[in-house]
Amino acid sequence: MTVKRRRPKPIRPWLPLLAALLMVLGLSSATATVAYGQDDTRQAVQQTLTWTAGDDITKYSSAPTTAVAGKATIVFENSTATGNTMGMPHTLTFDVSDPEYNNDVPLNILANPSDDSGGKHTAEVTLSPGRYRYHCTIPGHGQMQGILVVTDGGGARTPPRPRSRRRSRARRTRTARTSGWPPSACPPPTRARAWTGSSSPKAMGRSSRTPPR
């Protein structure tokens, strides 16, 4: 009995190249997925708005002037680190009684260097487009106030309106009539009569007559 041995199949040279290509594509897609996730994380990070106060009872030491609508972290610090050396309390209060300003954030934070948080407090809020008036409610601190302007953050401009074809055609027609082009819009030129003599026939007739005696 004769046993036939099978010959091993030759290794195709393009298989390793295909495997390497698939690995590269897989790594690229994974990197793109990670980068996309990082971008989403950056966009999801809330904005932080910080107010500080110190010994001055006429103004806040620092305060933001603008913000973007959406979720925000409010930080109010009135501590020795922000210049409060007398232990004076201050508040950060959003005015919700004046109809001229936004009244959807009833924020009221009381801070002093000797409280449990060391004078630093935070609050999570959601801001709407418009203006917020904030002030300190401690008696005698009425000058500590300001306005926070909140924008929608879109920034998209309305695209320019395309011109109508009828309007452009009418404009071209008026221009052509005014400038005398095309020739079809202009009256035909008047042909001048050619005279062979130096004088007109009437003049020649008058000159041939004999003057009266």
Image (spheres, grey):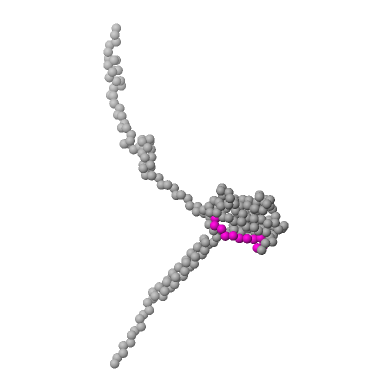
Residue at the outermost right position: 86
- Where residue 101 sits: x, y (%)? 56, 49
Q: Residue furthest bottom?
A: 1
Q: Position of residue 116 (x, y in %)?
A: 66, 63
Residue 31: % across, % down = 48, 68
Q: Is residue 133 above or below residue 184?
A: below
| Above-or-below relation of 125 to 182 | below
Q: Is residue 118 found inside the magenta-colored segment of the image?
A: yes
Give the dominant element type of the magenta stretch: helix, strand or loop.
strand
Q: Is residue 65 visible?
A: no
Q: Name which residue lies at 59% across and 56% down.
A: 107
9 with respect to 73 (left or right): left
- Residue 181, given in percent of the width and then of the height, sits at 35, 37
Q: Nearer the viewer, residue 110 or 73?
A: 110
Q: Residue furthest front?
A: 97
Q: Residue at x 38, y 40 (%)?
A: 171
Asked whether residue 30 is in view, the answer is yes
Please give the name of the residue rendered at 63% of the width and 55% of the height, measured from the top-left corner: 92
Q: Is residue 204 left or right of residue 155?
A: left
Residue drawn at (59%, 58%) of the image: 74
Q: How many marks?
A: 0
* Viewer-nearest residue: 28 or 167: 167
Q: From the viewer's perspective, is 51 left or right of 15?
A: right
Q: Quadrant of the N terminus?
A: bottom left
- In this rendered view, identify the residue nearer to me: 111 or 207: 111
Q: Is residue 152 magenta?
A: no
Q: Which corner quadrant holds the C terminus?
A: top left
* Residue furthest to the top: 213
Give the magenta-colored segment's residue range. Answer: 117-127
Q: Is residue 208 left or right of residue 137?
A: left
